[in-house]
Amino acid sequence: MTEASSPLRLRPLTKENILFYYFPLKGMLSYAALSVNVMNPSIAIKLLPKRDVTNFLLIHTIFGTTLYMYSRPHLKALPSNKRFAYSICGSVLFSFGSVLVWAVLRSAIPRNQGLSTALGLSSGLLIAKLSYDYLENNDSQAVVKKN
């Protein structure tokens, strides 16, 4: 089992863990909150009536997922500038693609706050899991090519 695929647990506060474990974890919490915010914006409005938190959540999601992708084994052999460019591109596509999916879902379902929230969280979980599996597959192929 690789470091990236190990179960969620507390890790020592090292530079590596902060950048490539805790920030990505915070990014996924922001991603979950973003899914609820897009699918059921009334929750955020009740909590923060004078603030739109969408951009805040989106930026934190992009930041966390960029760091996560940057640390993936299949990108390690690339120069840092390409690694960063690929990571930010993947993160932006993941984040904005998710927002687009949620916007389409929201317009296609009946106006029901519970249903919207549940569908936002469950679709976000599905998208995140599929993306994680995709990255794991790429990592496993990169390791196979080295041998």
Image (cartoon, rainbow, N blue to C red):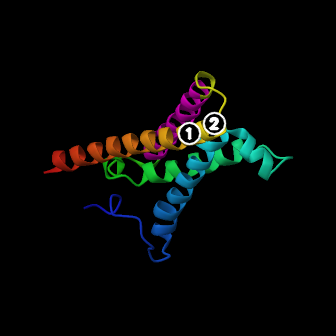
Closest to the observer, 75 or 32 = 32
Residue depicted at 30% across the width and 47% down the height:
136
Mark 1 residue crowding within 10 angstroms, few (<14) / some (14–19) / many (20+): many
Residue depicted at 47% across the width and 44% down the height:
87
- Residue 18 position, x and y percent, is 51, 67
Quadrant placement of the N terminus: bottom left
Amino acid carrying label 1: it is: Gly
Closest to the observer, 67 or 128 = 128
Main SS class of the magenta portion in the image? helix
Tell me if 85 is positioned left or right of 138 in this view: right
Inspect the magenta stretch and tell me whether residue 102 lies in it: yes
The residue that disc 2 covers is: 39
The residue that disc 1 covers is: 120
Tell me if 145 is positioned left or right of 55 in this view: left
Amino acid carrying label 2: it is: Met
Closest to the observer, 76 or 43 = 43
Q: Secondary structure at mark 1?
A: helix
Q: Secondary structure at mark 2?
A: helix
Q: Do tag 1 and tag 2 residues touch (Cβ < 8 Å)?
A: yes
- Residue 145 position, x and y percent, is 17, 45
Tell me if 2 is positioned left or right of 37 in this view: left
Query: How many numbered marks does the figure carry?
Result: 2
Question: From mark 1 to mark 2, how far is it between C-alphas?
Answer: 6 Å
Mark 2 residue crowding within 10 angstroms, few (<14) / some (14–19) / many (20+): many
Inspect the magenta stretch and tell me whether residue 101 lies in it: yes
Residue depicted at 70% across the width and 42% down the height:
54
Q: Is 32 drawn above or below residue 123 in the view shown?
A: below
Q: Is 23 drawn above or below residue 92 in the view shown?
A: below
Residue span colored magenta: 81-105
Q: Is 25 drawn above or below residue 82 in the view shown?
A: below
Q: Which mark is residue 73?
A: none
